[in-house]
Image: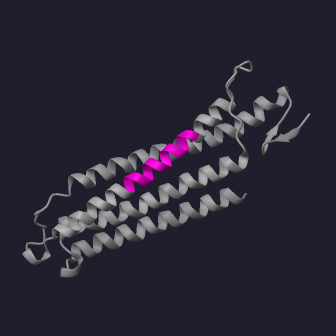
Amino acid sequence: MTGVENGLRMTSPETSSTSSLATTSVHVSALDGLVNVNSLFTIAVFVGLSLATPGQHSLEQRSSCDASADVAKKLLVFEVVSFSFFLFSSLVAQGLKLALNLLNSKDVNEIFRAHINIKVLRWGMMASAVGSVMGCLFLMLSMVNVIQIRLGLLSCGSKSAAQAVATLVTLVSSALLIYISTAIYAFWH
């Protein structure tokens, strides 16, 4: 006997263990991956924070290319905002994982069971993905400031800084475009 309850496909006990657990394990694996990637990015945030020392001289050898305190302030702000988005994304993903794990607990006599609507699951996963994308954008902006602090201001014509920023923006933007396209495709299919 097959039916739909709260947006989740409910099947008879004989088939529920195979189809429901297989689908759920895919969701849990996706959420695990998202949390792990967010953890790596969070480490990058703290590395960037350690580089925000005022009065640091760039490698450009011209004092006019040294970053001002405003660049260090922007770096700090972008790092905090990036960390906030990654934390948001990870907490949403962990909450969804908890709900899925409780939903599919193996003890059928358990009192506490989560009932999750598939729409809630999808929107939660999308919110987590949006948090990760926003965290990546702000991390990229903070890395531009790290480059300016270490290699010299873009406005002073530092070729090394310009090449590093161009590479960073091109690769990160391309990866985010692929990630967003894949997430939207998965959301609607």
Which residue is pictured at 67% across the width and 25% down the height? 112
Residue 60, relative to residue 176: is it above or below? below
When asked about the image quadrant of residue 138, the answer is bottom left
- Where residue 87 appears, as percent x and y from the top left, is 43, 47
Asked if residue 32 lies left or right of residue 114, the reply is left
Which residue is pictured at 88% across the width and 39% down the height? 3
- Where residue 186 appears, as percent x and y from the top left, is 66, 56
Which residue is pictured at 33% across the width and 55% down the height? 80
Asked if residue 109 lies left or right of residue 76, the reply is right
User: How many numbered markers are drawn?
Assistant: 0
Which residue is pictured at 39% across the width and 51% down the height? 41
Quarter holding the C terminus? bottom right
Asked if residue 6 lies left or right of residue 71, the reply is right
**Extreme residue in the right direction:** 1
Asked if residue 183 lies left or right of residue 82, the reply is right
- Magenta stretch: residue 19 in it? no
Residue 183, relative to residue 118: is it above or below? below
In magenta, the rendered stretch is 82-95
Color scheme of the displayed model: one colour
Closest to the observer, 25 or 90: 90
- Magenta stretch: residue 87 in it? yes
Quarter holding the N terminus? top right
- Where residue 113 appears, as percent x and y from the top left, is 69, 28
Residue 158, relative to residue 12: is it above or below? below
- Where residue 141 appears, as percent x and y from the top left, is 34, 66
Closest to the observer, 80 or 52: 80
The chief SS type of the magenta part is: helix
When asked about the image quadrant of residue 7, the answer is top right
When asked about the image quadrant of residue 102, the answer is top right
